[in-house]
Image: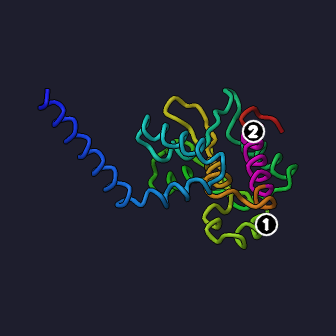
Amino acid sequence: MNFLKSLFALIGVILVAAMIYVWFTFDLGTRIAQIKQLDPKAKDVYTHMITTLLETGDIGKATVRKVRVEDGISPDDVVEALNSVATEMGIKPVGDLPLSKEVALRTGKPQPYTRVLSYCNPAIAIKMVQWSMAYGAYLPCRITLMQDKEGHYWLYTLDLDMMIHGGKKLPPDMLAYGNQVKKTIYTMMDKAAKGDF
């Protein structure tokens, strides 16, 4: 009996020592305070990202939004719908890279359809980079139209919730701009996937 008491006491001392070591080594007091300063939705953003990453092992899949294009809608119709909705929602088409066509021309080998389309609202973009230059990496907003191995078409873009809710809570004006961009890009994708002009 005394042996068990001594063993449990030793285990307790080791656990306490380990907790103290971890607390100070990783500065957990500071980290907890920093986590409390994040946007209230940051937990959901990172839970989704980490869950997807662990399930797939693919950081790309963990950081994007994708929408499948309905069967029977041609890539040209999808692009036309994207550009039409963009104009309607006040965002400009600023780039078009027909990636698969470009590579096919260079290699002489057909490629699965891949086209990268870029959009920007300059008034919002300049405000965001003035607030944080790091947002320049998100510019312009990109939507990629791709064909999978089964011949289905998909639209991909960055998960904009990470930009909006992934850090400290944005000031009200920046939050409004971020949500406006998210609504615009996601609406463009959802409508284009249905061939809705």
> As drawn, which residue projects farthest toward the front?
2
Please report the residue visible at 51 percent of the width from the left and 42 percent of the height from the top.
Answer: 61
Q: Amino acid at mark 2?
A: Ala
Region in magenta: 176-192
What is the distance, in whole Å, between disc 1 and disc 2 at their CAs?
22 Å
Q: Residues within 10 Å of mark 2 (few under 14, many from 20)?
A: many
> Counting residues from the N terminus, which is met first, the one under dot 1 or under dot 2?
1
In the drawing, what numbered circle is on residue 8? none
Q: Is residue 143 visible?
A: no
Please report the residue visible at 68 percent of the width from the left and 53 percent of the height from the top.
Answer: 164
- Kindly identify which residue carries mark 1: 122
- In the rendered image, the quadrant that contains the C terminus is top right
- Kindly identify which residue carries mark 2: 192
Near-viewer residue (32 or 164): 32
On screen, residue 71 versus residue 107, left or right, reads right
* Relative vertical location of residue 14 with respect to residue 97 in this rendering, above or below: above
- In the rendered image, the quadrant that contains the N terminus is top left
Q: Amino acid at mark 1?
A: Pro
